Amino acid sequence: MRQSIPRAPGPSDYSRDMAEQRLAFVENFSGVKTTHTRGYSFDPAILPGNIEHFSGVAQIPVGFAGPLLINGEHAQGEFFVPLATTEGTLVASYNRGMKVIYESGGVKTTILDDAMQRAPVFHFEDARGARDFGIWIGDHFNEIKAQAETTTRSGKLRNIEQYPVGKLMYLRFNYTTGDAAGQNMVGKATFVACEYIMAQYPGIKRYVLSGNMDTDKKSSRLNMLHSRGKRVSAEVTIPAAVIENLAGAPVDVLLQQRQVSSLGSFLAGSNNNGSHAANGITALFIATGQDVANVAESCAGLVYVEKTLDGDYYFSITLPCLIVGTYGGGTGLATQKEYLELLGCHGAGHVRKFAEIVAGTVLCGEISLASAVMAGDWVSSHDKYGRNR
Amino acid sequence: MRQSIPRAPGPSDYSRDMAEQRLAFVENFSGVKTTHTRGYSFDPAILPGNIEHFSGVAQIPVGFAGPLLINGEHAQGEFFVPLATTEGTLVASYNRGMKVIYESGGVKTTILDDAMQRAPVFHFEDARGARDFGIWIGDHFNEIKAQAETTTRSGKLRNIEQYPVGKLMYLRFNYTTGDAAGQNMVGKATFVACEYIMAQYPGIKRYVLSGNMDTDKKSSRLNMLHSRGKRVSAEVTIPAAVIENLAGAPVDVLLQQRQVSSLGSFLAGSNNNGSHAANGITALFIATGQDVANVAESCAGLVYVEKTLDGDYYFSITLPCLIVGTYGGGTGLATQKEYLELLGCHGAGHVRKFAEIVAGTVLCGEISLASAVMAGDWVSSHDKYGRNR
Amino acid sequence: MRQSIPRAPGPSDYSRDMAEQRLAFVENFSGVKTTHTRGYSFDPAILPGNIEHFSGVAQIPVGFAGPLLINGEHAQGEFFVPLATTEGTLVASYNRGMKVIYESGGVKTTILDDAMQRAPVFHFEDARGARDFGIWIGDHFNEIKAQAETTTRSGKLRNIEQYPVGKLMYLRFNYTTGDAAGQNMVGKATFVACEYIMAQYPGIKRYVLSGNMDTDKKSSRLNMLHSRGKRVSAEVTIPAAVIENLAGAPVDVLLQQRQVSSLGSFLAGSNNNGSHAANGITALFIATGQDVANVAESCAGLVYVEKTLDGDYYFSITLPCLIVGTYGGGTGLATQKEYLELLGCHGAGHVRKFAEIVAGTVLCGEISLASAVMAGDWVSSHDKYGRNR
Amino acid sequence: MRQSIPRAPGPSDYSRDMAEQRLAFVENFSGVKTTHTRGYSFDPAILPGNIEHFSGVAQIPVGFAGPLLINGEHAQGEFFVPLATTEGTLVASYNRGMKVIYESGGVKTTILDDAMQRAPVFHFEDARGARDFGIWIGDHFNEIKAQAETTTRSGKLRNIEQYPVGKLMYLRFNYTTGDAAGQNMVGKATFVACEYIMAQYPGIKRYVLSGNMDTDKKSSRLNMLHSRGKRVSAEVTIPAAVIENLAGAPVDVLLQQRQVSSLGSFLAGSNNNGSHAANGITALFIATGQDVANVAESCAGLVYVEKTLDGDYYFSITLPCLIVGTYGGGTGLATQKEYLELLGCHGAGHVRKFAEIVAGTVLCGEISLASAVMAGDWVSSHDKYGRNR
């Protein structure tokens, strides 16, 4: 006999009482008593739209790294960055990188592109049907855009890519989504657009709202090429003396090792030729109410370095698929909102600033870890800061 | 003048007082007051080894989905699965999938492989030097293994892969790591092994502990091929009537659409031909103290389906890079430990059970979302459960 | 003391006499006498622009397969296809496939896209420089197009893709190139366009005519997504009785095995989920004076199949990067021209017809080999037709 | 009414008379007369096992480049390399590279690995069945090897890789194949091994001889990682003065541009971060009777460069999937055999020498083209040597 988790109808399901009922139910089921899961400080009434079956919290410790000195177009000045993690060394490592970047005059951040996708697929009688449909889509973009945008205030349909394969036409709708990450927004808009297309264009045998070319919650070469969320660059030029002191090696050797790392990534078929962008991204995402599963996509990265004419070390990392929002999703929850506020990034008008802070943070972590690996003190740092497992 | 985050020496840094000092410092710096960040229920003295600069918490709401009925080799019976998320619809969607799988007799889970890597790179005079070194490595595996294992009780060196490129030799050390995820363990063991190799083998010009073929915190084809962490399969056969009711389409159409989705993934160069494994993985990882940044690797997936001779729908997903631990890392923290305990998975001896629960959960989410997309009620579900953004 | 191959100035270098001098020189150098290398039937005076140091020929045996029945938009009716190969079984296998396709009413071919690329890369002071340059490129497309097209009668610049990474901007110029494959044409056009851009746009630190995103003579996901040369589909619906007889298995099993093959390709990180498109493409390319090295790119493929409502087997293959010409390159040489003429494809106005013939041929080979593998007579066929090695 | 190509039974099909009958048939069918297709100098009686429906030849012009100075383990000294091509500039470009390499003391070549694959897939009841089968395979390797090797004198089964996915087990058999390329040999051996396995191991529901993880006639990350055919490196250190004169840029700029090209390749998802290995490989393959369709696989490449302590330019390219033979296939045909003989590479015992010559040639082409692109004289060279299209 299948037992069900207790639920109450509608908004009344979001209360301390219902949470407690559910927790008791699960405790009873498993014969385990818990304490800390009840340790939340907010009223569950804030949660509709963010979770179902609310029962308690996970408390993730947060440490600040900083100051991160940014010379961005949207983020400017110094920031103390909240990192939610349970992995020893992480905060210390990012903090160390931020110190180096501070000494180097700060990190320059630039948003290069901005798009969120939904990618439906349409079935036709044959390849000619798919191709001709593609021409029609090109010719009727404005109407389709108008339809899509009826569903949203902030979403704007920018362009539709086409990928025909045999009798199938995969479309990839690209939107700007204001200050929201926008996955739901573009799903809804594309649904309405597709229904409109179905009504207008004869000969479509079937369509499905996702043909897996979005590629939502997965990493893909396609998204690395054409961006998903923000495409952001972070750059710094570190004086030779500073980086050589940190990494224990001259700039020429760092250049060589960078090539070796990039080649390893290339051969492995990796989605990032850098070190560990996912660490900083994840810690910031948890703290600030981002959809953390987007780490799957956001972790992609492209590192490019140079020795400057002065012999200094130019380092850049471009995150082609950084999915962030400062509005909607988990950004308005209790702690999440507060961490965004501490960064001056909560709410409308701040998403680009926040994207720059994430990219700047990631760069600091890259400098720090790559130097540690080079200097050979990577393992000893983990011995010092990390749990010995 | 660069301001530093307040710190106290040694263990005394991990106290409510120091956390408060730091939080006050950051609040003062940004002119923002926070409340909920202080809302933690544990003593910071438990945190050394898990974070630096501890200042407060992120409170992530948790909902349970279940019962998840598993017929595993390590996980058997019913489980209520804690999912920490801020994304509306997620818990409901996994819960719905679990109901269907329950009706189908449960999900069968199998661990296919188990390995954690560190991949150093060695530089030689020329390609012949690299190749000859590879032969030596093969011939001296037992000694190298013995050296590596001096550093750890639970880590065992299983094999060393070789990837020579020109004068470089990339090695990839594969370990089993007991109940820990094991990244630090294998880093340390490989470091000692490399130092031993350096002492024994002449002609190495330089080595670096990671040549980016691990590929730690990144997704790669290499890891999908050769596993990182656990390679786990989850399988179910859903009666035709059940799935057709859910998806609103006959099994033949589901097979066709699966092919379309897989082809989209193939063309896009994606790391997963399924729907959204990252969602379930991330939510479980946050709740249970996993290194959430490993979502970057763990999100890879391989979906394979069949129509059975009886016309039913066999669905399987294999996660080739599921990185989990039930010991070490964040698994011992306050709420994290409790959620693991509710699953009967805390501590030594439970990692395989936990891996199976994750895989089983992921499968339920795949069934649920793929059916919703097919049935066309994906967008309306989000309207019902999700925040309208 | 380095010896040089004998050469004569200018056109006089292209004569039987000079070829003989060179052959004698090489024979003398290696102490080997040759006979058949002199066995060519044409006047070397036709060769300038096609080869340097002409010394003799390779004689590649050609067999015809056919009739290939095509229902294309440019190729219509029956064709006997010249295949130049030294691999036993190849012609027989394609021929067998053509017989099956004939019985199924012929193959339907469709050209979905058409573009040839050159992809320069521009260096800037920083990422903002790269991004702003991208905006300028968008705003000045018409002028750039006009400049590029000054160099060619048949080449038309269609669009310019942008891929910014840090301070670099990779551009990818897409041209239609009439009946020529067009690599040289687009190289020259893009060079002139780039020189124009350099003169107009300040702040470019350096540019290089290829940043390896073309990706000339290599295979890439990018080219599979956005096409290089022709993107062509070939489709057929094979009656169930016909395919089941050939493959020795019911359509449902063929669908299942197709999924297994596609999954293997996905996991392997392959550029083609089909069987052996490269075989037919190469044999046709050698016979007809194509740039055979383009097999590196042209071999990519996307197979998609269905069971029709009548239970028959729909099979399609899309070649996203088929690089062909019927004008220029080797298409005017002695035997090459003749084989093109036998197909009714020599010279201007025929490139699309030829592309359809190639795609149709490829499909026949896919049906034939996949069926042989399925039926288990693959090895025995090779024993029968192939050299026993 | 379908017309068939004329055929005669057995060996009598391989005669000038039958070739003429077929040619006349095709000429008659298409209303086109040909001349040069008849221009072959050999007796068709040599062709059984190499082609079916033999009707004539393709005459591909051959030019020599050289001397190529090699310091290999198997190829030593100077070689004049026969390149069969119809692409102007190709021979000149390789020749130019060989001159530079000569001045630099020659190219050093090294064979790093050697394996040919066939990759069957086995179906089981469930994932546990697949996994347990994998254990059995490991335990019974010696017997399986013995069975496989009953079919061949020169083929040796080296190891079997395992890639389990759900209820499927993909195996990848690796053989050494003596002086033959070996695809047919390993197909036959693996077939016998599989039949043996089927007889021994209960519970296999079905197997198919290729699950597309070989990945025959396709390019894949898997083959780049684990080699297919020979994995060969070619290396050279070019004095700074020499390369700077050629490329018109200092070594530091070349290093930077190499990084830019590698990054473009990485982002594009390419199978080669170099320039145009396929050009030299294809031209050599056509001349020497290789299976030219293997260009699909052989074109993969891994370039790695360094600035030496003396400031010179170390350049290497590793070809991970170079599929070559000096015995069997087309290597014994009329011109093919002669070109192999001119290289001292015909027949048994020479395959490694030949592989080194191919790799050495490829390196020369890389140096030449990369320098031309850098120096900006790429387009003007094509104007000089190539047909203006």
Image (cartoon, coloured by chain):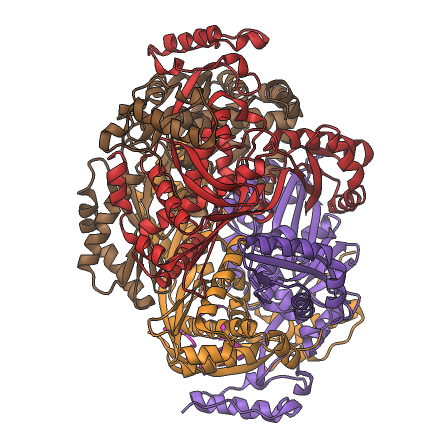
Chain colours: A purple, B orange, C red, D brown
Residue furthest front in the image: D1
Q: A92 or B8, which is in the foreground?
A: A92
Q: Measuring 65% from the left and 30% from the top, which residue is drawn there?
A: C185
In the rendered image, which quarter is residue C200 located in?
A: top right
- How many numbered dots are placed on residues in this image? 0
Q: In the figure, C355 relative to B110: above or below? A: above
Q: In the figure, A309 relative to D126: above or below? A: above
The residue stretch that appears in magenta = B326-350
Magenta residue check for D252: no
Q: C310 or D349, which is in the foreground?
A: C310
Q: Position of residue C96 (x, y in %)?
A: 35, 44
Q: Quadrant of the N terminus of chain B?
A: bottom right
In the rendered image, which quarter is residue B56 located in?
A: bottom right
Q: Judge from the rendering whether residue C226 lies leftward or rightward of residue A154; answer left or right.
A: left
Asked whether residue C186 appears in the rendered view, the answer is yes
Q: Judge from the rendering whether residue D146 lies leftward or rightward of residue A325; answer left or right.
A: left
Q: C259 or D131, which is in the foreground?
A: C259
